[in-house]
Image: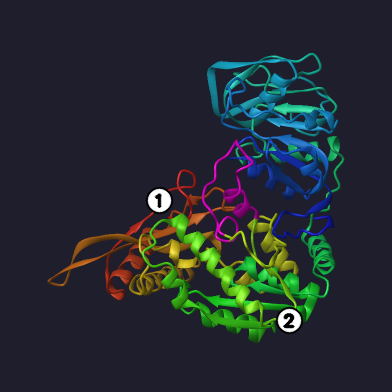
Amino acid sequence: MGYSEANIVDNAESHIVTDEGIVVIDFGSQYSHLIARRVRELHVYSELVSPSSTWEMVTKRLTPRGIILSGGPSSVYEDDAPTIPEWVFESKLPILGICYGMQALVHQMGGTVAPSSKREYGHAILSQETSDCILFDNIPKSLEVWMSHGDKVEALPETLFPLAHTDNSSMAAIGDGNKIFALQFHPEVAHTPLGMSVLDNFLQKVCQCKQDWTPGNFVSECTTRIKDQVGNAHVICALSGGVDSSVTALLLHKAIGDQLTCIFVNNGLLRKGEAEAVQNTFKNNLGLNLIYIDAADRFIEKLENITDPEQKRKVIGEEFIRVFEEVSSDVSHAEYLAQGTLYPDVIESETPDNRASARIKTHHNVGGLPEDMKLKLVEPLRYLFKDEVRDVGVELGLAREMVYRQPFPGPGLAIRIIGKITKEKLHLLQECDAIVLEEIRNAGLYEDIWQSFAVLSDNRTVGVMGDHRTYGYVCAIRAVSSDDAMTADWVRLPYDLLAHISSRIVNEVAGVNRVVYDITSKPPGTIEWE
């Protein structure tokens, strides 16, 4: 993770700069983020940028060693199809086009792309045309790949030639044999078993990248840059007890020591017993300066009668900032607010400059922040994925139970209560959620699941308990597997476990008389319901 300037963000813009890295131009594919992750897994820093980004914008944050063009849902001949910026060609850097990225490259270099008479989705066998292609070095001549495309390349520009084919694609891989390569298949997905080897060849043998993006390097260099940025000023850290804010707090504590004051705000939207557990962990066990603020009534009052999930997030985000600003007046020279913002938060929230993709939802700590903030932001994890944060946590010596704690949304239970938020509904959800987590742990599945939780629906149903009619809320159980929260699949929990959880909820939580299990993946759904 070789930084040359801090991975630190102020109110205006990010100031992360790395010694070197790979630029991934995002054309709107569901796999774009996965490309960036795969590059990082090979210990090379990568960052997603919009097709509208300028060279100046890109080089503010890293020194590019190569460029990857992602896939996307568009056709190159559509009026509003995204295009490769001119600086990609002017830079003379190595280029790897993937799917739509390949088609855009061919189209803009003077070749021909057209709709295919036979679409190609799923597994295919790739056969190499040559034996000395650097991109396929030490890779079998025939290999399994994953295709997902409707258009195809019909004619190549003069400077490119075929490198490999499938039964349905005569030009499934093309290039100039030196710096420009393009693939019709997706090397970044697990369905292409040797895809990581292809990417590794591009990074090492074509781009000549140093593989120094490691947790140890990140900790060392990020703490140094935090010192340079903060100086003698004080920082307050928004602490939730989750791995993101915990790692943020430890990074800052390592960098600036007693200049850090952690603030834990009980917004009334926490899980059962969480306020007490967080205070004990950080104040007593880790020795951090911790201020506890009970603002439960304040947040619940602000959320009264608000049902729209986007509005909930924005209200919570703004109220958090107002609380921190008020508290900061009691902390000498407090000029900065530290947050555990992650890269998926940024990707899902910030898209006005990226016409190829759409905003999924506003995260309370990104799009929910007020414009008139008095504090400058410090967000050392802003360009990390969740698994990278956990690696950094291990590097910092954070306890395993904290490193592998399941994610909990910043807005808390507010976005797991559908509709209006009341104290009654909060209590019901806390009890339901506690049962879900307890039984998941008892089954030995907690660390194997990305997230497991309860949702309280706004619907009520008729039930029968004993000889009495009931009219109670519907509780939904949600459990998903994921690598980075960008995509997720529902977990096939054992039926006996689901039955036991359901039985406990309807018997122990008065006011809930029906339990359902959510079997929706992301996409088309999201992990949270709101």
**263 inside magenta stretch:** no
Q: Secondary structure beneath disc 2? A: loop
Q: Quadrant of the C terminus?
A: bottom left
Q: Nearer the viewer, residue 22 or 188?
A: 22
Instruction: Residue 408: tell me if it is visible.
Output: no
Mark 2 Cα shell of 10 Å, populated few (<14), some (14-19), many (≥20):
few
Q: Main secondary structure of the magenta part?
A: loop
What type is the residue that disc 2 sits on?
Ser
Classify 195 as above or below 459.
above
Q: How is the image coloured?
A: rainbow
Q: Residue at x 43, y 58 (%)?
A: 478
Callouts 1 and 2 close, C-beta under 8 Å: no
Please report whichever mark, 1 or 2, sits nearer to the chain's N-terminal start. 2
The image position of residue 351, as x and y in percent, is 60, 44
Stretch in magenta:
343-368
**354 inside magenta stretch:** yes
Residue ID for mark 2:
332
Q: Which mark is residue 519?
A: 1
Q: Nearer the viewer, residue 170 or 413?
A: 413
Q: Secondary structure beneath disc 1? A: loop
